[in-house]
Amino acid sequence: MNATTKKNLDWSKLGFNYLKTDYRFCAQWRDGQWSKGELVTDPMMTLHEGSPVLHYAQTCFEGLKAQTAPDGRILLFRPELNEIRMRETAERLLMPPVPTELFMHGIEEAIRANLAWVPPYGSGASLYIRPLLIGVGENMGLRPAPEYDFRVIVCPVGPYYKSGGLSAISLAVIDIDRAAPLGTGAYKVGANYAGGLLATRKAQALGAYEALYLDPKERKYLEEAGSANIVLATKDKRFLTPKSPSILPSVTRRSIVTLAEKELGYKIEERPIDFLAEYPNIAEMGATGTAAVLSPIGKILIDQKWYPIGENPDQPGPIMIDLYNRLTQLQKGEREDPYQWTKAVQLD
Ligand code: PLP
Ligand code: COI
């Protein structure tokens, strides 16, 4: 068996879980410099007990996917946007940004070293890529870490939500905010997610898949879901998405908005969205994210009342199905990419 012989996995049954693959890419920032990085086999990390990542959550990450195209190429989707977002997040946390070339090299190396784990074309699965940057080293006071570790983990994944594939999800507004108006909501910092665990638990206890956050200032306008941005198609052919300084700039949402505008002729409005005021005019809603892809939203719980969305809250509607197909066909290289969003990994 050579390194590219695919693992004997039931690809179509994969969920969104950690699966140990053969290699991960690691680089270190020591004495003010990034190392050139290397592939390692050990999934365990040894950290100093004083590491700021452990005490003060000086950590950020990214998430992107690679897919196998019909012609065997392995395609990344807009990785440069993940690189920019990780750089901006690192700067927000006073971490040394991973240089662009090192970020891209780390991703491509981790993929090349784990070709056997890249789901084959048509399997329905993708290779999820998780770049991680953490502050490490001896420390006690509240200050930036003396050293940093960058790591790229990859693992094959299936659908994020347990509903699987393209099926409707539900969201619940609960009594927790994800971010403060001038906080870290727009950045992919680990602490945002630790703070959201209870929100997800509460939303799930109410029968929803995950939490839907409102703006933290007035608790009136839509923000985003725990792991995805929100888009909304109206009955009069407008396409709305929340504008807020405290939501994560989703790569998937930006792509879906472009497809809705350029390919379906929607008028785009990025602005504060008062869900209850907008509700009578909502045709369909969706949650966008690398893990979530475009998950149609079937119903929303607010103040103990479920609001069904679209014709049938249990089924994806035609607009979200159309956009999902357009997006995923691009990501899988099944159609021409006029936007130049996909980037083939150099395989030799
Ligand atoms: N919002 C949050 C809070 C997320 O964690 C994610 C996932 O990365 C997204 C939105 C979607 O962003 P993207 O489409 O870049 O994956
Ligand atoms: C992603 O979609 O890449 C994310 O990082 C969301 C995460 C909660 C799985």
Image (cartoon, rainbow, N blue to C red):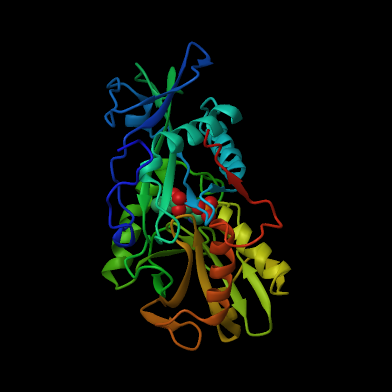
Q: Position of residue 206 (x, y in %)?
A: 29, 72
- In-front residue for pair 109/16: 109
- In-front residue for pair 47/58: 47
Q: Position of residue 94 (x, y in %)?
A: 53, 28
Q: Is residue 276 left or right of residue 5?
A: right
Question: Who's the residue at 37% across and 30% down the image?
Answer: 53
Mark yes or no: residue 17 visible. Answer: yes
Question: Who's the residue at 54% across and 53% down the image?
Answer: 71
Q: Is residue 337 left or right of residue 28?
A: right
Q: In which quadrant will I find the N terminus?
A: top left
- Name of the residue lying farthest toward the front: 1
- Name of the residue lying farthest toward the bottom: 311
Q: Position of residue 101 (x, y in %)?
A: 59, 28
Q: Which image quarter: residue 153?
A: top left
Q: In the rendered image of this protein, does residue 336 appear above or below residue 308? A: above
Mark yes or no: residue 179 visible. Answer: no
Q: Is residue 222 left or right of residue 146?
A: right
- Name of the residue lying farthest toward the top: 31
Question: Who's the residue at 48% across and 59% down the image?
Answer: 228
Figure label count = 0
Q: Position of residue 104 (x, y in %)?
A: 55, 34
Question: Who's the residue at 44% across and 84% down the image?
Answer: 308
Q: In the rendered image of this protein, does residue 13 appear above or below residue 340? A: below
Q: In the rendered image of this protein, does residue 214 appear above or below residue 30? A: below
- In-front residue for pair 116/58: 116
